[in-house]
Amino acid sequence: MVNSYSKKEFQQDLKKLAKLINDFPKTTQAGGKRSKDGKLVKMRTFEVVKVDGKNVKPHGNYQIKEDSKVGPEVAATKAAKMMCRKIKKNGGKHTECQGKTLVIREKTSGSAHKHFGPYELVVEQLTPKESQARTDALRKLTEKRLKKEGKSAKEAQKVTSKLAKVTHRVVAKIMRK
């Protein structure tokens, strides 16, 4: 006995297939940053290529949102903070960052890889009130992150109590010629 496949069954199967195709996600990108609602956030990526006018091996991966109103200056500020952090970690002081210049290059896939800058690093001393507010905010964020990672409240508090007091603000400002 042979079962036949009727036109009606064929049409039903076509409708099911069409529904599967329409329900399939339009974007197939798996990686990248996503917002809280799951939508893909387009980012631009930059790297440092010059420090104090001297070419350096390109380094860093400083990202900003593609629709950022300020643009590459945000990435330059991130690079400046990282540079000052490294200087301080190696026994230096914040004042050693003051006046340094850097040039960044966009390395976003599909971009023209344009250079931006030079940006001058400006280190500002915070007032005691600002310093206390920033230190408290840093401790709160760190404690929240540690709790999320599964640390106990006591362990998180122990780590946050060792955090250094925030005393300076580092900003990269474009140099005008």
Image (cartoon, rainbow, N blue to C red):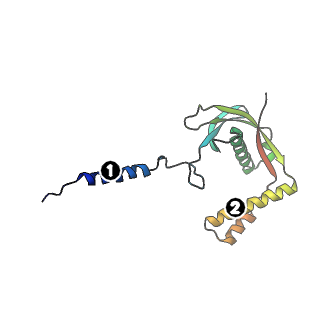
In the displayed structure image, the side of residue 113 where residue 82 appears, left or right = right
Of 4 and 20, the residue lying toward us: 4
User: Eyeballing the image, is 52 above or below 81?
Assistant: above
Residue 136 visible somewhere in the drawing? yes
Q: At which x and y percent is residue 21?
A: 40, 49
**Label number found at residue 52:** none
- Quadrant in which the N terminus is drawn: bottom left
Residue 163 visible somewhere in the drawing? no
User: Residue at the location (68% across, 71% down)?
Assistant: 153
- Would you identify the image quadrant in which residue 134 lies? bottom right
User: Eyeballing the image, is 36 above or below 99?
Assistant: below
How many residues crowd mark 1 within 10 Å: few (<14), some (14–19), many (20+)?
A: few
Q: Which residue is mark 2?
A: 142
Q: Which amino acid type is marked by label 2?
A: Thr
Q: Which residue is mark 1?
A: 14
User: Residue at the location (64% across, 35% down)?
Assistant: 105
Name the residue at the top extreme.
177
